[in-house]
Image (cartoon, grey):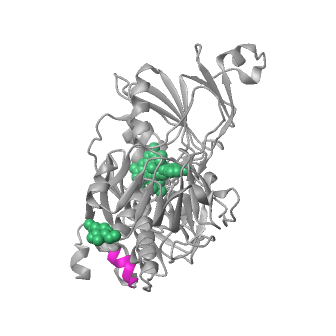
Amino acid sequence: MTDRIRKTFKCVVVGGGIAGVTCVEQLSSRLPSTDVALITAGPHIKAVTNYKQVAKVLEEFDVEEQPPSVLQEKFPNLTVIPSAVNTLHTQSHLVETADGHVYGYEKLCICSGARPKLLTQGKPYVLGIRDTDSAQEFQTQLTQAKRIVVIGNGGIALELVYEVEGCEVIWAVKDSAIGNTFFDAGAAQFLIPSLGADKPERAAPCKRARYTTEDPTAGEAQTFTADRHMRGRDSGPTEAGSALGPDWHQGLVLKGAERASRRVSVEYQCEVEQIFTSEEMLNSQSQTHKPDTEGTWPVYVRLTNGKTFGCDFVVSATGVTPNTEPFLHGNNFALADDGGLRIDDHMVTSEPDVYAAGDVCTACWEHSPLWQQMRLWTQARQMGWHAGRCMAARVLSEAIELDFCFELFSHITKFFNYKVVLLGKFNAQGLGSDYELLLRCTKGQEYVKVVLQGGRMVGAVLIGETDLEETFENLILNQMDLTAYGEDLLNPNVDIEDYFD
Ligand SMILES: Cc1cc2nc3c(=O)[nH]c(=O)nc-3n(C[C@H](O)[C@H](O)[C@H](O)COP(=O)(O)OP(=O)(O)OC[C@H]3O[C@@H](n4cnc5c(N)ncnc54)[C@H](O)[C@@H]3O)c2cc1C
Ligand SMILES: *[C@@H]1O[C@H](CO)[C@@H](O)[C@H](O)[C@H]1NC(C)=O
């Protein structure tokens, strides 16, 4: 093997996604005369463009596909190798690529991303969505479809369901509310009307912050657990099923006006039990497989709630699995429960001189109480950046600390065409029942939720143009005791920026 070494680089980065590209940029700009290689399987690299630091931690940027030559022009000492790494030998510090070459490294950073978890291996009519481009590709294919079933409740499913038009969507989620990865039931309720409308209509502010909902399986009115901790700024009487969304009950059948441009029905608290082809369906005499839908379809999905739907295809958006496979054989990587490469606060894996960043890794340092890992663009960039800095610091024998961005979880995105800002423990993650929520909501316009613990702000969800992100980020970072402000914190008639200047 050693006699086949083509070249040995000081630093090798594997993967041309956001993590890998950001890492390479850091390395190449900090160590301009060092030999750096980027080995990537895809024909394009993913670049961060229009980067904007919104506040101390909050950032916003676009993601763009570019030819690798763009990077090479910027960094003449960078070599881009367009191939996939097949094997890694951490002892001898070598990687072998699919095109049969062997490269040596002194330091390696694995940024190979993640793969979508596929529902069923090799079943026809089941699609996994890999990235935004295949999502667009999927949208084109959709033109032939009359009905699809979407499985999953993360950001991808959320986005997808909203984007699909002119096709009926059955959306199966394992939770009791949509978008559980990002939102609580209240935010979900705020967003739900968007699925039934072409344009969000303006409406009066909701009467109360307190909300209840129906558990679709129980059929009984049930109050969400978070409700116990909820204080609304409006002290009206509470009643079941009031306020935020009109269609929340009854298993939610939402029809898009006359043209039926968007038609989504949500099946709550269920997962896929089985997927049948139309032949399997025909051959099955069993009554239990009788579809709940008319007509003949290429594929049928049986859900754990007992319903069976025929559709044109199934979209599986049930999360991702770290792409570690090519690197594990013959090595001794410590893996986290979610399958990611365990890394410490210097982005180092358990193998010598091997770093990792982005979706492929699992952050195993002791987290700040206001941060959690989520496999998102923001964190791929932040981790790639930190990994590049750590590797460079190591080469230069400099000391380096965990970057400030890991102090506070922050993410800006768009869901259902609303701007969404998530800060800290935005869903009271890991707080048990020891927290309080403040809520403000104007239907079709904004949804503001603040998570307080011991009088201090520990998280927030801001949907719409709230203009509160910078102030709230500050309040979370400085952990000021807000008890004295009470519900004025969300009073729209109080300019809270003035309060804290
Ligand atoms: C459909 C979809 C929509 C999403 N939308 C959003 C969103 O709106 N906002 C958001 O924040 N996040 C979103 N995400 C998540 C986000 O895309 C990821 O968190 C992020 O891209 C991770 O970046 P990465 O660099 O770690 O990995 P990736 O972007 O997956 O890049 C991995 C790179 O490694 C290369 N590679 C893989 N294996 C090898 C190998 N063996 N050898 C060489 N190269 C290899 C690949 O070719 C690729 O270039 C979305 C994800 C999906 C799937
Ligand atoms: C590339 O590296 C060489 C030395 O290896 C150095 O002289 C040169 O300045 C570097 N190029 C740039 C653009 O930094």
- Outermost residue on the right side: it is 286
Q: Nearer the viewer, residue 283 or 404?
A: 404
In screen coordinates, is 65 left or right of 383? left
Q: Residue 293 appears in which quarter of the rendering?
A: top right
Q: Residue 298 appears in which quarter of the rendering?
A: top right
Considering the image in quadrants, where does the C terminus appear? Answer: bottom left
Q: Nearer the viewer, residue 234 or 154?
A: 154
Residue drawn at x 46%, y 21% as measured from the top left: 145
Q: Nearer the viewer, residue 321 or 104?
A: 104
Q: Nearer the viewer, residue 188 or 271?
A: 271
Residue drawn at x 50%, y 36% as measured from the top left: 252
Residue 476 on the magenta span: yes
Q: Is residue 422 visible?
A: no
Q: Which residues make up the magenta segment?
A: 473-480
Asked if residue 232 is positioned above or below residue 453 in the image, the reply reads: above
For ligand 2, the image quadrant comes to bottom left
Asked if residue 349 is positioned above or below residue 253 in the image, the reply reads: below
Residue drawn at x 21%, y 78% as measured from the top left: 498
x and y percentages locating residue 362 in the rendered image: 57, 65
